[in-house]
Amino acid sequence: MKGNNPYLIVFIIQAIYAAMFLLSKAAFDHGMNNFIFVFYRQAIASLFLLPFAFFFEWKTAPPLSFLTFCKIFFLSFFGVTLSLDIYGIGLIYTSATLAAAATNSLPVITFILALILRIEYLKITTSAGIAKLVGIVICVAGVATLALYKGPRLEFLSHHHILSSYHETKQLHGHESSVTWIKGCFLLLLSNSFFGLWLVLQSFVIKVFPSKLLFTTLQCFLSSIQSFVIAIAVERDIEQWKLAWNIRLLSVLYCGIMVTGVTYYLQTWVIEKKGPVFLAMSTPLALILTIFSSALVLGVIIRLGSILGGIALILGLYCVLWGKSREQIPKVPLNLEHASV
């Protein structure tokens, strides 16, 4: 039974992310301001993580220099604050299904950024290099399909919805126009690019400040301050800042505690047990869960273009991951004459 635990944990992780896509979309569709949402999410995450960081790492953490603090500040701004703000706008313009599908491009985007920064390399003379190049091309094709091709509606399960009344009204008024949809796709891709850049650059900072939990808590705290400044500049109506016992409060609590808090620990555990490639290969689960949940909970009408684009992104993801795994296989020496029997 213990051997199956990582498989159960990655399913739980992707289910948490699928619920995040749905709850965020539901909160935005019910009128919550995206920038206020990000502030509350990061503030709650900071409050949730602070006791754990203080208890487990406060005494063992290395001294934080001013230069390192500045690096963490800018990491928080680009990789967390801007990424989440842009992601929220893109989600408003599109759908939870598209947001989940776009997430599959994140490992490929991260690889391209690492390639530009010369952290990764690409040898097209090897099978691994060809696989990674093919994966990048397929990923680009998938993004283009999501943005430019909607296709016919697949109205399965859409009559069993739970929270769809407001969402259906917006659909009937032409909310998902072609221009808006393309703009949303671009914003989701831009958000993933900022997040991918954050993944690449934080590896440099973690070398000089290896206290991971405290590092994450500090980023959440700085991001909450940054997102508050942005939110108060955009929205000053006090009514928009009020949280009642509704989908808005549920969404910010869920994203702050479950997504930022719980999945951080679960992902660290999976990477330790099975490695980062194993975790990355589970990403398509979130798309599958989101497709069915969107139809059941929000009454979203799934389009063929979202399915085809999502499949292309998954294929591109697996090509890049296969190429990476091939490169990590140790080469067996050809001369075995002196090998011990």
Image (tube, rainbow, N blue to C red):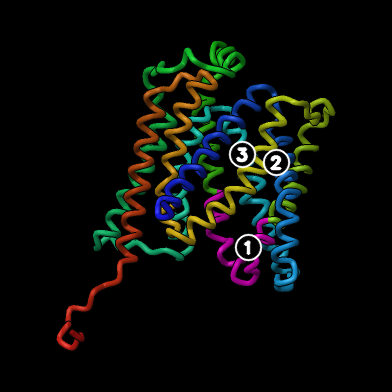
Q: Is residue 199 magenta?
A: yes
Q: Earlier in the sequence, mark 3 or mark 1?
A: 3
The residue carrying mark 1 is 212
Image quadrant in which you'd find residue 268: bottom right
Specify start and end residues of the magenta stretch as a single range. Answer: 194-216
Whether residue 177 is visible to the viewer of this picture, yes or no, is no
> Which quadrant would residue 187 be assigned to in this image?
top right
Identify the residue at image location x=53%, y=59%: 200
- The answer to whether residue 123 is left or right of residue 248 is left
Find out whether the residues at labels 1 and 2 contact each other: C-beta distance under 8 Å: no
Marks 1 and 2 sit apart, C-alpha to C-alpha, by: 20 Å
16 displayed left or right of 63? left
Residue that numbered label 3 is attached to: 86
Residue 41 - label: 2
Choose the circle earlier in sequence order: 1 or 2. 2
Crowd rating for badge 2 (residues with CA inside 10 Å; few <14, some 14–19, many 20+): many
Q: Of helix, strand and loop, which one carries label 1?
A: helix
